[in-house]
Amino acid sequence: MPHTDGPDKKAGGLEGELQALRRRIAELEKVEEALRASEEKYRLLADNADDIIWRSDLDLRFTYISPSVTRILGYTPEEAMEKGLRQALTEESVQKVAGSLAAGQATAAGGKIDLARSQFLEMELKRKDGSAVWTETVGRLLAGPDGKIIGFMGVTRDISKRRAAELELKDSRESYETLFQNSQLGIYRTTPDGRFLMANPALVSMLGYSTVDELISQNVAEVGYQAGYPREEFKKRIDAEGELRGWEAIWKRRDGSRIYVRENARAVRDAAGKIRFYEGTVEDVTERVLSEQALRRDGDLLNRIMETSPAGILMVNRQGLISYANPRAESILGLGRSELLNSPFGDPAWSITDAEGAPASEEKLPFQKVMATGQPLYDTRYAIRPPGRGKVHLSVNAAPLFDRSGKPEAVVFALEDITSEVKSEERLRASLKEKEVLLREVHHRVKNNLQIIWSLLNLGSRGLREGAEMDALQECRNRIKSMSLLHETLYRSRDLTRIEFYNYVRKLVTELFQSYGVTAEEVALRMEVEDVDMGIDAAIPAGMLINELVSNSLKHAFPAGRKGEIRVQVGANEDGVVTIVVGDNGVGLPRWLDFRQSESLGMQLVTTLTEQLGGTIDLNRSKGAEFTMRFHPARPVREA
């Protein structure tokens, strides 16, 4: 009999399906609850993340964006959702995003969608306030149930600080490279065994190589140092101290010549503490070292010169204390170096006097004078009496030494003991004084003898009548008088070797006027006489010339009471040539008379005396008679 399901059986089947449905619903509720819990965890994570977590559709409109957008871009999530991603992109960033989207869509069109594949973009985003912020975005595609791309999701991080650090690092590297390439200092990196790892152009040039590669191919420990270079000491110290500063040594150029260097170096170690390489800088100090060596040689030479100098050398500091004394200074002053050093120069106990023997006041002491004026002092004489010694006469030369501001900070003295010379001069002056007294006596006696002769001629003329004999005797008396006056002038002069020519001529001409009985009302006298420098050998013939010519004018120029003027001029030019002019405005000499061939004794004397002086004589007849004589008094006077 066929089996059929009854109502009970159908009811049991429905109940089973209901139970299965209830189990399925319970499972779905559990999944939904788990999904809800997971979404809450995700949202909690997203809402509290430092980075911006977002999702968007294909038009870059946000479907979700985390609150951190406010901190990074300044927008609230609601404002960002409204504006979308495009509003936050700069022009350059738009291009980057467009390129990334195009690549993703091209991949999707080819059926090669890899939803797990992420893309990385560094780009600038615009903040709400208009400023820019550098960000790094990690994004990937989102696909729907049908596998088609429906949008994007990503995480955007603010990398402004990292970007700034990278730019700073880049600038630092560029600066270092610029410094490395253009530095005047040599820069190197070498292994402990001396192989070059790196060298800049300055070091290449410094060591005389053509290229960096040429230098790097060398081993500095083998070819770079002069014999005796303490390479091991260098390594020992840098290994112990980690660095060296101011290390000076002698390196060797490619051509074998020396180069003096000053080196700063440090050791660079690996994580285990082992030295990887040395790096440092090298300064070429050859010029400085050679200059210092030259200065030391010059200093040694100067020291030897000062120590062996025949002059006493003292150095006195700003405080007036002796800081250096050479052996000769010790000998001159009779004091040992220990007694001189740090003692005051010009100690009152030394009884310093000037050249005239007067006590030298403090402001006149050589140290004070040089310090006050900053000017050197040459051949100034002083006398001192150091303790325990007799008087010492010194010739002092002094020169200031200046500090950096240009102010005197010390004085160097060169002392010469002239005691024996001063004593010789004193003896010579005493001897000259004796001779001067004797010479004055000679002039005095010659003057007296000439005066006696003049007086005898006066007595002899009393019996003579007026005429040629009387005139001749008068002329002789005047000539003797002129010579007597010269000896009297010398007798009264301060210098027996030079004549005071102005006083001599004035007195001679005045006495000639008196001798001939001529007054100033009859014949005026105009004298323009300079006190020319003239010795006795030239003064005697010059005085007799003036005597003859003035006498001639007084006797012949103004006959029969005629009035007029006699001029006497004496002067000298820059070369020392003396010009004597004697003239009158009287009747003058006859046109036919040649005074050089005249038989007159007076004219013959004028010509002879001019020749004796080695001079010239000229006659101007335009207004009376004017004689002009020129001669150099320093030339030897010829024998008459």
Image: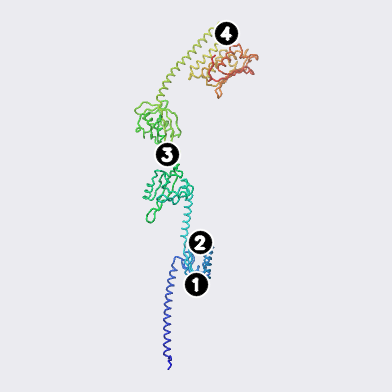
Q: Are marks 2 and 3 in contact (CB under 8 Å)?
A: no
Q: Are marks 4 and 3 in contact (CB under 8 Å)?
A: no
Q: Quadrant of the N terminus?
A: bottom left
Q: Quadrant of the C terminus?
A: top right
Name which of mark 4 and mark 3 comes first in the sequence: 3
Name which of mark 1 and mark 4 comes first in the sequence: 1
Q: Amino acid at mark 2?
A: Ala
The single residue placed furthest to the right in the displayed view is 591
Name which of mark 1 and mark 2 comes first in the sequence: 2
Which labelled disc corresponds to residue 470? 4
Q: CA distance from mark 2 to mark 4?
A: 136 Å
Question: Which residue is denoted by mark 3 in the rendering?
Answer: 293
Which is more foreground, mark 4 or mark 3?
3
Percent from the top left, x then y, of residue 211?
Answer: 48, 49
Left or right: residue 478 compared with residue 242: right
Is there any visible trace of residue 382 in the rendered image? no
Percent from the top left, x then y, of residue 229?
Answer: 40, 44
Judge by depth and name the residue closer to the eye, 116 or 96: 116
Residue shown at 49% from the left, 75% from the top: 145
Question: Which residue is denoted by mark 2 in the rendering?
Answer: 132
Which is more foreground, mark 1 or mark 4?
1
Name which of mark 3 and mark 1 comes first in the sequence: 1
Which is more foreground, mark 2 or mark 4?
2
Name which of mark 2 and mark 4 comes first in the sequence: 2
Name which of mark 2 and mark 3 comes first in the sequence: 2
Which is more foreground, mark 1 or mark 2?
1
Q: CA distance from mark 1 to mark 4?
A: 166 Å
Q: Are marks 1 and 4 in contact (CB under 8 Å)?
A: no
Element under disc 1:
strand
